[in-house]
Image (cartoon, helix red, strand yellow):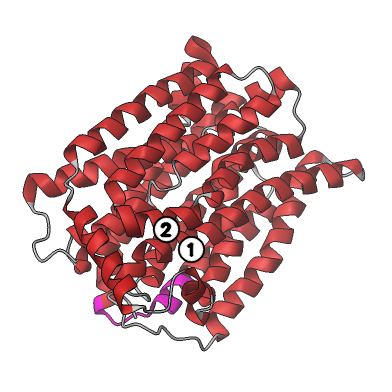
Amino acid sequence: MNPNPLQGRGAVVVFACFAAGYFLSFALRSVNAVIAPELTQELGLSNAQLGSLSAAYFLGFSTLQLPLGIWLDRYGARRVNAGLLLVSATGCAVFATAPNVLALWIGRALIGAGVAGALMAALKGYRFWYSPMRLQQLTAWMLMAGTAGALSATVPVQRMLPLIGWRGVFWTVALLLLLVSIAMFRLVPHDEERATAASAARAAASQKPGGYREIFLDPYFWRFGVLAVLPQASYVSLQTLWAGPWFVEVSGMSVARAAEALFAFSLSSVIGFSVQSWLLPRAERAGWSMVHYAALGMGAMMSMKLAIALVDAPWAWALWVPLALSATCFPGVQTHVSLSFRPELAGRAYTSLNLVLFASIFLTQWLFGAAIDLLEGLGWERAQAFRSALLCWLVFEVAALGWLLTSKARPSVARGAMG
C-alpha cells in the first residue's frame, strides 16, 4: 500500500484514465446487442452462431485472466493495461474489416483479450494509490463508468448505424482505444510499478507458497465463486447480448424501440452503481456481512428474472429496470473476495474470480442461444423458447444462492471491508 495515497488532481487523472478504458471495454462488450440484427441479416447467422460470435469476446477475455494476474503482480497496472488496450484496438480494426464470420470471431476474441485488464488493472492499482476505505466506492464508480459505456452502445450506436454502419463504429472505437492507451502511458504515475516489483521480489525471497493454487483451493473463494459461475454470468449474458433480441422477439418491439429499452436498462445500472457507492460504506459500518449483502441482491435479481420469464404484457419491459438495479451488488463481492489474499497476490486474486466469471459468460451466452435453437427445432414458438431458456437458468441460480448461504467457509486473511 502507498503510504501517501493520491490526492487532488493526481487522484482524478488516474481514475479518469482507467475509467475511460473500462468505459470503452463495456461498450464493446455490449454493442452486439444493438448491431445483432445487422450482423444476422448481412451474414445469415443462427442464434447459436450469434451467441458464439458474441461469446468470442468472453473467451478471449477469460483466456488472458491467468497470465494477466501474474503480469499485474510483476509489472504493475499502468504498463499492462495500456499495452493490452492496443491489442483491443487491433481487434476492432480486424472486426471492422472482416469479410466473413471467422474473421469477425477472431476480431471479437482479440477485443476481449485486449480489454481483459480494463477493470482488474484498475482495481489492483487502486489498492496501492488510494486509501483502503475507498476501494468499495471506487469499484462502484468504475462500474458506473463501465455501464455508461454500455449506455453509449445503445441508442447512440443505433443512431450512428445509418451514418457509418457497424464497421464505422468499430473503427471509431479503435481510435479511442489508441488515445486512451497513450494517455495511460503518459499520465499515470510509475510508483505502483516500482512497489509491485519490490513486493514480487520479497515474496520470491521469502519463498512463501501461493499463487493461483492458493487462490483456487481457498473454500472462501468458491463460496462466492458460484455466484460468478451462475447468477452473475447469466445476467451479463442478458445485458451484453440477449436483452436486445428479447425485446424484439419476446416483447415485440421494433429495433429502434429495443435500443431505447436497452438504454433505459443500462441507465438503471448506472443509477444502481451510484446507489451502491453510497450504500456499501454504510452497510459496512452497520455491520452487514458480504454474504447477507450479496444474498439480498441475488434474491432480488432472481425474482426479477422470474417475473420477466413469466409476465406477458406490454409493460413487461419495465421489469428489466429493477433487474439492472439489483444486479449492481456484484462489484462489492469481487473487491471483498480479493481482500482475502496477501497484497502480493492482489492481481491474481482479482483475475481469478474474473476468469471464473468470464469463462462462465462464454458458456452461458452460447448455451442460451443453443437452447433457443433446440426448442424452436422441437416446434416451440420463438418467444416461448426464450422464456423457457431463462427459467432453466433460474433453477441453477437458486442452487448457487443456497450454496452461498449454507457454506461455512471463512476468509483466511483479515478483510478490509464487510468481513
Residue furthest bottom as drawn: 408
Check if mark 2's residue and mark 1's residue have beta carbons within 8 Å: yes
Q: Is residue 231 left or right of residue 205?
A: right
**Residue 243 in the image: x percent, y percent?**
60, 42
Specify the segment rendered in magenta: 285-295
Q: Which structural element holds mark 1?
A: helix
Three-letter amino acid code at the position of disc 1: Ser
Residue furthest top as drawn: 163
Q: CA distance from mark 2 to mark 1?
A: 8 Å
Identify the image quadrant of the C terminus: bottom left
- Is 291 magenta? The answer is yes
Identify which residue is drawn at 35% across, 44% down: 81
- Is 15 magenta? The answer is no
Whether residue 140 is visible:
no
Q: Is residue 37 left or right of residue 69?
A: right
| Residue 69: assigned label | 2
- Residue in front for this viewpoint, 72 or 168: 72
In this picture, is 50 found above or below 254?
A: below
| Residue 150: assigned label | none
Residue furthest right as drawn: 378
Identify which residue is drawn at 77% across, 32% down: 46
Res 302 quadrant in image:
bottom right
Identify the image quadrant of the N terminus: bottom left
Crowding around mark 2 (Cα neighbors within 10 Å: few <14, some 14 to 19, many 20+) is: many
Q: Is residue 157 left or right of residue 79?
A: right
Res 85 quadrant in image:
top left
In this picture, is 280 found above or below 357?
A: below
Identify which residue is drawn at 16% across, 53% down: 191
Residue for badge 1: 352
